[in-house]
Image (tube, helix red, strand yellow):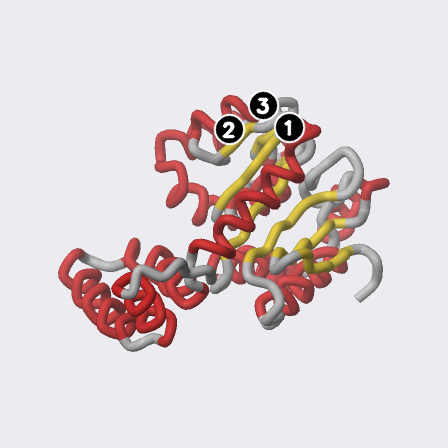
Amino acid sequence: MSNLVLYEVKERVGYITLNRPEKRNALSYQLVSEIKLAFMNAENDNDCKVIVIKGSGEAFCAGADLAYLQQLQTNTFEDNLADSRHLMELFQFIYHSNKVVISEVNGPALAGGCGLASVCDFSFATPDSTFGYTEVKIGFVPAIVMVFLVRKVGEKNAREMLLSGDVFKADQALKYGLINYVVKPEELADNVFNFAQKICKQASAQSLGLVKEMLADIQSMDVSTALEYAAQTNAKARATDDCKRGIAAFLNKEKLSW
């Protein structure tokens, strides 16, 4: 892995930093490859419990590298399909990660960059951070992120964002349900770290993984199927070491730190 993506762990918080500031961290094939590799490393890192993704410089991620997109116009349909699946796999990996993923948005998060923030479990942003799915304005389609966005914010809000292609600030992103918190620029890093630490200390890793798995799966199920799946997950959770430890600590009135 080159220095396009940086990875470090600080007190069980794994930081994945997009490190292409001269291009506003725009997504190229290589950058997507390295983000995927960093997430795989974080997923398998026992020292990492919560993952934070952020951008270096003045942008979170400005979307796809347009020069790279222009090169793709000479590709065959099969080549473009393979490239599209490359980005799809990244979003899918983040969405299905067993670990909680937080985006720390310090500036523009546009098009594919907005999608990257959208698939995270939580998003923090500064007041002047900007968001938008601008693809329709250049004759493109926000296809892959749409699958996740409708689930996250509902069809009404998704239609407004995707069909207008408008760029909007963090306060509007908060109203849409696209992000969770808006904080001052000088407090962004500390707020994200403290929130990640709270999750690390207060929640079981096994429980977090099962909750995320259920959230991803039940939305495509009918009620009866989802309830049976829930009952089986409930039974499986009771047999985990974390559940046994948690119940014992509760009954013994012991303070538990995960």
In the rendered image of this protein, does residue 98 appear above or below residue 133? below
| Whole-percent x, y for residue 78 in the image | 62, 64
Is 183 on the left-hand or right-hand side of 58? Answer: left
Q: Residue placed at 80% from the left, 55% from the top?
A: 4
Query: Does the CB distance between marks 1 and 3 fall below 8 Å?
Result: yes
Q: Which residue was labeled with disc 1?
A: 129
Residue under the image location 54 percent in, 40 percent down = 123
Amino acid type shown at disc 3: Lys
Q: Amino acid at mark 2?
A: Ala
N-term mark: 1 or 3: 1
Q: CA distance from mark 3 to mark 2?
A: 6 Å
Q: CA distance from mark 1 to mark 2?
A: 10 Å
Asked if marks 1 and 2 touch (Cβ < 8 Å), the reply is yes
What residue sits right under mark 2 in the picture?
173
What SS does tag 1 mark?
loop
Q: Quadrant of residue 81?
A: bottom right
Disc 2: CA contacts within 10 A as few (<14), some (14-19) or many (>=20): many
**Label 2 SS:** helix
Q: Residue 200 at x, y = what percent?
A: 51, 56
Residue with the mark numbered 3: 169
Q: Nearer the viewer, residue 203 or 95?
A: 203
Q: Amino acid at mark 1?
A: Ser
The dot on residue 1 is: none
Q: Cα distance, mark 1 to mark 3?
A: 6 Å
Q: Quadrant of residue 48?
A: bottom right
| Residue drawn at x 79%, y 44% as measured from the top left | 67
Residue 147, image x and y in percent? 44, 49
Find residue 193 and report its image quarter: top right
